[in-house]
Image (cartoon, coloured by chain):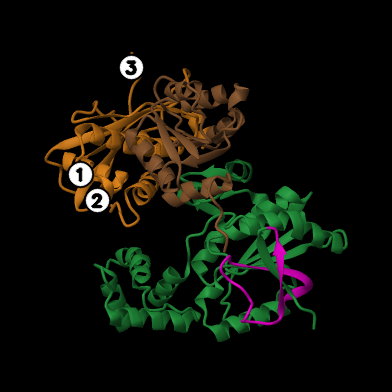
Amino acid sequence: MSEHLLEATTQDGACTLSAAELLPEESVRAVAEEIWLSFIGEEEFLIPLDGEAPANPFSAWVGIDGPWRGRVVITCDESVAQDLTRCLLGEETVGELSQDDVEDGFGELANVVGGGLKALLPEASRLTLPLVGANPPAHGEDMFVIQSIWRGQSVDIVISSVPLQY
Amino acid sequence: MHALVIDDSRAMRRIVGGILSDLGYEVEQAGDGQEALNVLEAGRVPDLACVDWNMPVMDGLSFVSAVRANPAWRDMTLMMVTTESEHGQIVRALAAGAHEYLIKPFTPDALRDKLSLLGLVPVEVP
Amino acid sequence: MTLAAADFSFVSDLVRRESSIVLAPGKEYLVEARLLPLARKAGAAGVSELVEKARRHPDRATTQSIVEALTTNETSWYRDGDPFSQLGTTVFPQLLAARPAGEKLRIWSAASSSGQEPYTIAMVASETIPGGSSRVAITATDLSTEMVERTRAGRFSQLEVNRGLPAPMLVRHFTRAGAEWEVAAALRAMVTASQLNLAQPYPRMGPFDVVFLRNVLIYFDVPTKQDILRRVRTLMRPDGWLFLGAAETTLGVDAGWERVALGRTSAYRPIAG
C-alpha cells in the first residue's frame, strides 16, 4: 500500500490517487457502522440504500491533511442531525437540544468518522477540527458518495480530494 | 475519586463524564489542554484525566507531555480518549506518558474495561 | 419487540437440540437482540419472520446460523484480569519448572469465541516466558465454525480491540490491517483453532497443562456439565490447572477437582485417582 502511494505521488510529494482508490467504500462503511453501533445505539444500523434527498440539508465536515488532502462531509436532514445528536447523548436523558448542542454533537460525529478514515490511509496525516453548517465547501472533482439510510432517512458520506488552499 | 474530562466537544465530555459519574467519580471538565492545565495549576489534581487528542489551543499530546514534565502531577493517571487510531499515534501517546488509550467510537463497557485495567474501578468479587 | 411464546420455544428447542445450551424463559430479549441482525441479513422484516422461515424450511444453513448467533458472546481481552495475571506469575513458572527443558506446555481454550481468550493466553506467554512463543501451544475450540474461522484469521475490529486490551499490548502485538487490527504472526503461530462441540465426543487431543473452560458451562444442564467436567479431567496432566468463569464452580457438580486459591481468583486441579 505504502509503495503504491509512493508511486502515486508527484515530485512535490502530493498524492495522485483518487479519494475512492484511497478509501474503498467497503472500509468506509465498516468504519461508519462501528460508529453507529457504539455511539448511536446497539441496534442502530446504517443500511446501504439510497434515500430521498433531505428537505433541509445539514452537514458536518473535517479535513484530512497529509500526502493526500481531502475532506469528509456527512450530510443529512437537519432533523436527522438532531436525532443523531440525541442518540449520541443518550436519548432518554436529553431534554431540549439547542442549535449549539446539535452543531457540537453532529460535528463530533464527523470528527470520529474522519478519524476512522484517516487511519485507513497509508501515510500519517492530520485531522482538522470539525465544522458544521447548511453549506459545506464545494466537493473536489473526484467526489464519491456513500449513501445510507438510518431510521428511514438518508445519511450521505461524501469524500473527495481537495486542492491546496492558500 | 476525581476525574478531569478534556475534550473540545461538549457531547463527548458529557458522554465520558456521564459514564464516570455513574461509577462514582466526581467529574470536572475542560475544553482544551490549556484549560485543563489551569485546573491542575489551581490545585485540583484529579486521579484520572481522559484526554482527547485534537483540540484547539493546546492538543492532548502536548497536555500529556506537560503533565509528565511536572513531578507534582506524577500520580495522575492519563488516558487518551480519541479518534486518532493509527498504530504510530498510539505509540507516540504512550511514549509521551499516557497510561492507556481508548479509541473513539467506544461503548460504555469499553471505557469501564480500561478503568479496570488501570485499577480505577472497584473490582467485583464473585 | 416482544417475541411470541411459540417462536421462543421453537428457538430454544432448536438451540438445546443442537448445542445442549438451555435458553430459559425470560431470555426472549436475548433471542430478539441476537437474531435481529441475522434477520436483517436474511432479508426478513423481523425475528418472527426469520423464525417462521426456519420452521417451514429448516435448512442447515439457517438453523446453524441461528444456533451460532445465540451461542456466541461478545468477549473482552484479559476477561476478569486475574486468571491471566495468575497464569503468568504462578501457573507458567510452576509448570515450566516441573517439565523437562524444551517440552511445550499445552493449553486448551475450550470456548474460544472470536479468539480473544487464546490470543490473550498467547500474549501472556510471550510477555512472561523467555522464548514464550516456542514453549507454549494453544488449542482453541468453539462450537461455531464462524468463530473458528475468525480465530484463525486473527483479525479484530476497532470495537473489539477497545474491549480490555491494554494499549501497550495492542501496539506490541497487533498491526493495522485496513479498518481492522491483525494479531502478530508469532502469536498466530501459537494458536491452532478447530470446531468442537463440548457436549459431544472429543477428538484425540492433549494432554493439557492448562484448560480454560470459562463462561460456557452456564449454558449446559447439570448432567451435561458433569459429563464435560469428567471428560476434560481425562484430557489433563495430573498437575494441570483448570480455569472456570468467575461465577462458575465444579463444587456440587463434579467431585474430581480440588479448588485452589490463586491471588484474588481460584483455579481447579484434578484430584489424583
Q: Colour of chain B?
A: brown
**Image point 85% across, 59% down: which residue?**
C97
Query: Viewer-proximal residue, C109 or B88?
Result: C109
Which chain is home to disc 3?
A
**Residues at discs 2 and 3 both on one chain:** yes
Magenta region, residue range? C235-263
Name the mark on residue A80.
1
- Mark 2 vs mark 3, foreground winner is 2
Any idea which chain is the orange one in this picture? Answer: A
Any idea which chain is the green one in this picture? Answer: C
Task: Tell me whether the residue at label 2 lies in contact with that at label 1, contact meaning CB atoms closer than 8 angstroms.
Answer: yes
Image location of residue C87, percent across then percent down: 71, 58
**Image point 27% across, 74% down: which residue?**
C48
Q: Earlier in the sequence, mark 2 or mark 1?
A: 1
Whether residue C177 can be seen here: yes
In the image, is A36 to the left or to the right of C270? left
Whether residue C201 can be seen here: no
Q: Is residue C251 magenta?
A: yes
Residue labelled with disc 3: A165
**Image point 37% across, 33% down: which residue?**
A18
Task: Tell me whether the residue at label 2 lies in contact with that at label 3, contact meaning CB atoms closer than 8 angstroms.
Answer: no
Q: At numbered mark 3, what does the secondary structure look like: helix, strand or loop?
A: loop
Position of residue A128 relative to residue C265, above or below, is above
Residue at mark 1 to residue at mark 3: CA–CA distance: 31 Å
Position of residue A156 relative to residue B53, above or below, is below
